[in-house]
Structures are given as C-alpha cells and as structure tokens.
Amino acid sequence: MISFGERIFNERVARGWSLRQAAARIGISHTYLSAIERESDPRTGNPVTPSPDSLLKICNAYGIPFRDTEKVFTSVNEGDMIKFLITQLRMLRKSDAKMYKTVLTEAEKD
C-alpha cells in the first residue's frame, strides 16, 4: 500500500500539474505541498504531518475521500484535530442545520 505522500504525488503527476499549480489549486504553499509529498521537511529531515485543514483541502483538490486519510491522522496533534472538528461542525451548522442535528444525534449514540 502506498503512503499518503506517494498517493498525492501520483495524483498530481497524473493530472499534469506542477507543484506550484497544485499548491495554488489546493490553497497551500508549494514548499508545504512538496514536504507533504516527500513526508519530511527538507530543511530538518523531520517527518511532516499535514494539518487536518490541509488534508481536507488536498482531498477536495484531488477528489480523494477524506476517510482515506485516517492513517495520516494518527500523528496529528489532538488539539489541532479538535479545533478542526469544531470548525467543521460550526460550518455545517450554518450550511445544513438538518445534517448538523443528524451528526450530533449520531455522536450521542456512541
């Protein structure tokens, strides 16, 4: 199984997008996208874990189901994840109140 970085690299190449073109479509810097694709920061060699917001933007740009990023989330900071989820819930409440209530009802079942 290929890693998330390899997958988005392959998706970008298949579309014929340069790194800068893809980054512009996603809404992140080309250096950040490069680090995500390589899965490490070239300056430090440290692993790169994209933020939940960046993951969502990448998924939207490439048509990747967000649920496919589950393995990437194992290394995301818990606080960042909570902030991201709260933001997503607030946006859902504004855009689709019925779905928002459904999500909350389902969450209470667990």
Image (cartoon, grey):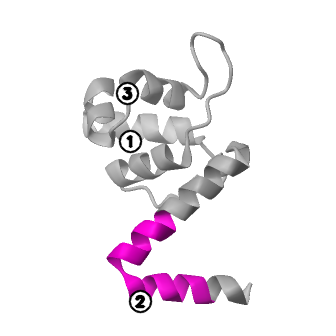
Q: Distance between the residues labelled 3 and 1?
A: 17 Å
Q: How far apart are marks 2 and 3 (CA)?
A: 35 Å
Q: Within 10 Å of the Cα at label 2, are there few (<14), some (14-19), or many (20+) other Cα atoms? A: few
Q: Do the residues labelled 1 and 2 touch (CB within 8 Å)?
A: no
**Of residues 99 and 15, which is closer to you in this image?**
99
Which residue type does callout 1 highlight?
Glu
Residue 67 seen: no
Q: Residue 98 carries which label?
A: 2
Q: Is residue 26 left or right of residue 99?
A: left
Q: Quadrant of residue 83?
A: bottom right
Q: Which SS does the magenta portion mostly show? A: helix
Q: Describe the element under mark 2 as helix, strand or loop.
A: helix
Q: Which residue is drawn at 70% across and 44% down?
A: 77
**Percent position (x, y) of residue 11?**
38, 42
Q: Residue 29 carries which label?
A: 3
In this view, the mark in front (3 or 1): 3
Q: Quadrant of residue 33?
A: top left
Q: Residue at x 64, y 57 (%)?
A: 82
User: Looking at the image, is mark 1 or mark 2 earlier in the sequence?
Assistant: 1
Residue receiving disc 1: 11
**Of residues 11 and 23, which is closer to you in this image?**
23
First to last magenta residue range: 88-105
**Percent position (x, y) of residue 56?**
45, 52
Q: Within 10 Å of the Cα at label 1, are there few (<14), some (14-19), or many (20+) other Cα atoms? A: some
Q: Describe the element under mark 3 as helix, strand or loop.
A: loop
